[in-house]
Image (tube, rainbow, N blue to C red):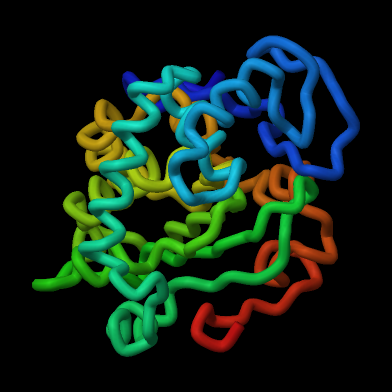
Amino acid sequence: MEQRGEVFLEKKTESEETTAKEEATTDKRGGECVNGSTSAEQNKILLMRAFDVDDYMIRRFLRARDLDIEKASAMFLKYLKWKRTFIPTSCISASEIATDLGQNKVFTQGSDKAGRPIMVVFSGRHFPRKGGLEEFKRMMPEGQEKFAVIGDMEGWGYANSDVRAYLGALTILQDYHPERLGKLFLLHVPYIFMAVWKAIYPFIDDNTKKKIIFVENKKVKSTLLEDIDESQLPEIYGGKLPLVPVQDS
């Protein structure tokens, strides 16, 4: 456990990633795992198949609500309403997020050892602006798979602070894309960020908190290599993969 002011975070958690290729294993949610789902989950997935989506998406919403079908269904309906509002065509055009792309702050390529796509975000390149929150909400990658995030805060200052965007990101992750965040590595965290962190911490659910890792400056490469192979690790962190902006990937 690591202490930051009054905030406590787990330094390391077991990978939660399961895929269709895994062999049957026993899961604490009860029963044998089949394609990553327990027998209890499979029974409830069958009951929720009225929603015209794949089983993996249904499972994410069920897990986010501790397999409570009523709560998971309500959560999914809320997601559908949100998606119709923000992503009516089911895809995002570059013109809709032109400013965010122009800041060259988001990179996506490579995958971690659990097979999760990696997103690298440079928060020191983000600047709050009018209308930025709506554009930011459209930056979330579509799909059902989990992903890992490297949040590099080098150069971050109060001019980059955007509490509304941070809370917006939490809402998207926790309410509309549950169980998609595999891990979030926070690098080069400046001391002044902790004031902002204390403000947003109460809004982070317990499952998400377990996935956030504050990485010590002297252990960036060694910490990342525990979850990411050197061939998939960005060159700037001691790996072999060149960074490519999301719009060019």
How many numbered badges does the structure rendering display? 0
Look at the picture and state if 23 lies above or below 51: above
Residue drawn 39% across the image and 70% down it? 90
Q: Locate residue 23, reporting x and y percent.
A: 90, 32
Say which quadrant the N terminus sits in.
top right
Identity of the residue furthest to the front in this view? 50
Rendering coords of residue 103 (x, y %): 36, 81
- Residue at horizontal 35 percent and vertical 22 percent from the top: 70
- Of residue 240 and residue 72, the one placed in the foreground of this image is 72
Residue 202: x and y in percent read 26, 26
* Side of 115 relative to 104 (left or right): right
Q: Considering only vertical position in the picture, is 118 above or below 236?
A: above
Q: Assign the C terminus to one quadrant of the image.
A: bottom right
Using the rendered view, name the quadrant where residue 215 is placed: top right
Q: Nearer the viewer, residue 49 or 130?
A: 49
Outermost residue, left direction?
130
134 lies above or below 73? below
Q: Residue at x 49, y 52 (%)?
A: 188
Looking at this view, is 148 or 29 the one in front? Answer: 29
Q: Nearer the viewer, residue 214 or 179?
A: 179
Residue under the image location 32 percent in, 47 percent down: 79
Q: With 97 as the anchor, is 33 left or right in this view?
A: right
x%, y% of residue 67?
Answer: 49, 19
Describe residue 34's horizontal placement relative to residue 96 as left or right: right
